[in-house]
Image (cartoon, rainbow, N blue to C red):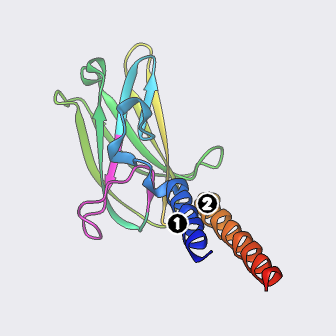
Amino acid sequence: MIKKLINTWTLAALASISLYSGLVAAHGKVTLEADVCVRNISGSMVHLSTYQPQYDPEAEYCTEIPKEGETVWVLDLVDQALRDMPIGIKIVRGSGQALSDTVASLYSTNHADGIIKGEFNLDEGQYTLFVTGEGVPPLQYEYPIRIQMTNYTEMVFKAIPYLITFLLLALITDKFLKRRQAQQ
């Protein structure tokens, strides 16, 4: 009977591990088409990466930046056509319809290597990064940026597998204990 209980707990632990969303390949380990940091308009793609080397030199973020402060951003112009046109970059406080003042802006005409980079120092809150390719027609990409904000929806979805596993283990343990009491 103990062996059966150990097997059940092992199975439940394996199910929990397989449901854990943290094991899914994240930002740096997916194809370009599946990357959440890529914006695609009519086949023209841009990719945004942000870094905070003063906190974690190896971490790469996209639009959820964990701490306020100095942040390095790198915009990769994937499509060759974008590399041949002027690019405007603007960071605005707010998101959606609630946009307010421009925090930073950059205009680049020389980016033959397809990389535009810079730094910004943002406080906690929501921002929007606009990338405008000034071609015909103009291409506009938009990145909502959240600085040091807790995403409670994401936290709930990450906790669901653990909650389900806990409830299953509680149910299995309850059934086992009731069956054991009935046998005595």
Left/right of residue 69 with respect to residue 18 in the rendered view: left
- Magenta residues: mostly which secondary structure? loop
Where is residue 74? Give x, y as percent: 28, 45
Where is residue 91? Give x, y as percent: 44, 48
Residue 168 vertical placement versus 117 (above, below): below
Left/right of residue 91 with respect to residue 150 in the rendered view: left
Where is residue 79? Give x, y as percent: 30, 22
For the residues marked 1 and 2, what is the alpha-carbon distance in whole angstroms? 16 Å
Labels 1 and 2 touching (C-beta < 8 A): no
Residue 40 vertical placement versus 38 (above, below): above
Question: Quadrant location of the C terminus?
Answer: bottom right
What secondary structure is found at the residue carrying circle 1? helix
Q: Residues within 10 Å of mark 2 (few under 14, many from 20)?
A: some
Q: Residue at x 29, y 30 (%)?
A: 77
Residue at the far top in the pictured view: 136
Left/right of residue 57 with respect to residue 156 in the rendered view: left
Name the one closer to the observer, 136 or 160.
160
User: Would you identify the image quadrant in which residue 71 lies?
Assistant: bottom left
Name the one closer to the observer, 176 or 33.
176
Which mark is on residue 164? none
Question: Quadrant location of the N terminus?
Answer: bottom right
Q: Nearer the viewer, mark 1 or mark 2?
A: 1
Name the one closer to the observer, 112 or 50.
50
126 within the magenta span = no
Which mark is on residue 10? 1
Left/right of residue 148 with respect to residue 105 in the rendered view: right
Q: Which residue is mark 2?
A: 161
Where is residue 33? Give x, y as percent: 41, 29
60 within the magenta span = yes
What secondary structure is found at the residue carrying circle 2? helix
**In the rendered structure, which segment of residues is drawn in magenta?**
48-65
Q: Residue at x 26, y 19 (%)?
A: 80
